[in-house]
Amino acid sequence: MLGLHRSTRKISLGATSALTHAFNNLFIRQMSSIQPEQREVVTFLGLNNLSDNEGAVKTRRRVGRGIGSSKGKTCGRGHKGQKARSGGGVKPFFEGGQTSFIKRVPKRGFKNRHAEPMVPINVGTLQDYIDMGRLIPSDEPLTIKDLVDAGVTKCSSVKHGVKLLAKGKERLKTPIKIEISRASEGAIEAIENVGGEITTVHYNRLALRALLKPEKFEIIPKRARPPPKLMQYYTDYEKRGFLSPEIQLRKLKEELDATSEKTFES
């Protein structure tokens, strides 16, 4: 078997060389029949002939090589001065010493470093998502997490909370219970006119993260009380603040009713 394998290999190599020789002869005959001026010169690209296009690379001028090079001695910088020094020169916006443009332009306003911008959501948008079946009202109040899960807003967009606005209130027809960070007067009126309930609840950054991503916590932290500057908002019943006496009494009544129902069933 070993000898047969070697002989077969010799035959195959011989046949290959014969085919190559015949192909070369055919190519030479065809090329000889073509006039020299009609022949197309083909150059194959290889590692030995790689180069930039002509004119793509220009040799830099070597300064300081004598007066014969036209850039000797001062190297084209002239005698002394700020621009003649190494590392010298003026800034692009330098105006010769006069008051610069940025200083001449008046400044207006400022950016509040302590601002807590809310994500705006309209009551009409809530009704649209209810009609699509992506928001399902229930006895439990809807939270910001329910809005994020339904795709009303992105989780990454909610930095400080969500504010409910009244645009599209004429389309709202489904009574819903909702807990939201802030709400406008028109939104509160629109929700309650169709038989719904709304409560404004304070979330600090930790409580908001625990609400939106509870899987990140082994133990859900207790929600913090509002800071003094926001206490007035969340204790005001006109804002439907969760710390207002009316909202506290309503929640207490609901808890008592639930307890009495369980007692009656047992």
Image: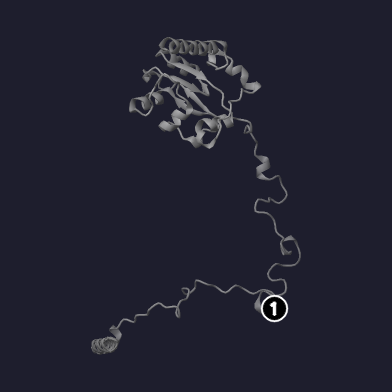
Q: Which residue shows up at 49% across the image and 73% down it? A: 55
**Residue 216 picture location, percent across and down:** 53, 37
Specify the quadrant of the image occupied by residue 219: top right
Q: Furthest residue to the right?
A: 80
Residue 107 showing in the rendered view: yes
Residue 34 showing in the rendered view: no
Q: What's the image's color scheme?
A: one colour
Foreground: 33 or 223? 223
User: What residue is disc 1 on?
Assistant: 67
* 10 Å crowding of disc 1: few (<14), some (14-19), many (20+): few
Foreground: 237 or 83? 237
Specify the quadrant of the image occupied by residue 15: bottom left
Specify the quadrant of the image occupied by residue 126: top left
Does 4 appear above or below 264?
below
**Residue 204 picture location, percent across and down:** 59, 28
Foreground: 63 or 40? 40
**Residue 258 picture location, percent across and down:** 46, 13
Split into 4 quadrants, where in the image is the N terminus? bottom left
Q: Is residue 124 left or right of residue 201?
A: left
